[in-house]
Image (cartoon, helix red, strand yellow):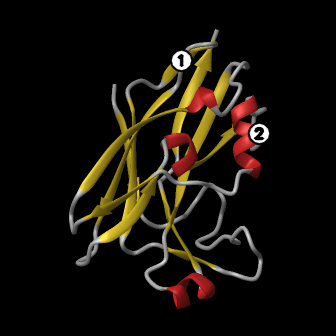
């Protein structure tokens, strides 16, 4: 069973269409240029099994968009919640990424309508050791189009939430 979600606007899970940027002085703007799609190959995983998401980032705009690539765990911010709304414990890498301000090793340009596909292992970031239902959401910072824009706002693309279960 393949479950698919695709969104370019944040709604639902966090109950907002705009969230605060890392720096409270710089507001966040939801990207109208890029969208993040997420698929998952199954809806239930045994405790200890890797939970893998397939991610598609697509340029929906009419102009090329520059993005930075370092690896999925660094390029996308993952948030997972259990059915009670609590975030599970993070792995060592997950904790590190909470405080990492980012680095990039490669710059790519997505042409209009171009897509890029990557695989993201949720269990590299979260310790999913308790059976139950979970919801995951991804977001990604999009580099500013100009130095003025970089000072004015942070642009982010968001996925729709995607659900899965952890079983015994």
Relative height, residue 72 to residue 164 (above, below): below
Q: Nearer the viewer, residue 83 or 123?
A: 123
> For the point 31% across and 59% down, which residue is it?
58
Which residue of the protein is positioned furthest toward the front in this rendering?
A: 105
Relative height, residue 2 to residue 138 (above, below): above
> For the point 62% across and 86% down, which residue is it?
151
Q: On residue 83, which mark appears?
A: none
Quadrant location of the C terminus in the rendered image = top right
Quadrant location of the N terminus in the rendered image = top left
Secondary element at image label 2: helix
Secondary element at image label 1: strand
Residue 88 drawn at (x, y percent):
75, 34
Residue 47 drawn at (x, y percent):
63, 13
Q: Which residue is mark 2?
A: 95
Left or right of residue 166: residue 121: left
Q: For the residues marked 2 and 1, what is the alpha-carbon distance in whole angstroms?
A: 23 Å
Left or right of residue 43: residue 78: right
Task: Locate residue 27: give its quadrant.
Answer: bottom right
Which of the two discs, 2 and 1, sits closer to the camera?
2
Q: Which residue is mark 1?
A: 45
Can residue 84 be seen in the rendering of this structure? no
């Amino acid at each position: 069973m393949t479950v698919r979600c695709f969104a370019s606007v944040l709604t639902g899970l966090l109950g907002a269409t705009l969230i605060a940027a890392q720096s409270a002085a710089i507001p966040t703007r939801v990207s109208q240029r890029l969208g993040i799609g997420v698929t998952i190959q199954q809806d239930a995983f045994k405790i200890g099994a890797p939970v893998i998401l397939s991610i598609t980032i697509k340029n929906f705009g009419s102009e090329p968009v520059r993005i930075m690539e370092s690896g999925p765990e660094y390029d996308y911010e993952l948030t997972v919640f259990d059915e009670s709304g609590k975030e599970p414990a993070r792995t060592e890498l997950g904790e590190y990424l909470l405080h990492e301000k980012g680095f990039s090793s490669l710059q790519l340009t997505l042409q209009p309508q171009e897509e890029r596909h990557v695989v993201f292992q949720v269990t590299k970031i979260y310790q999913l050791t308790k059976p139950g239902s979970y919801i995951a959401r991804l977001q990604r910072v999009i580099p500013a189009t100009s130095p003025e824009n970089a000072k004015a706002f942070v642009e982010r693309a968001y996925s729709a939430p995607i659900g899965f279960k952890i079983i015994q």
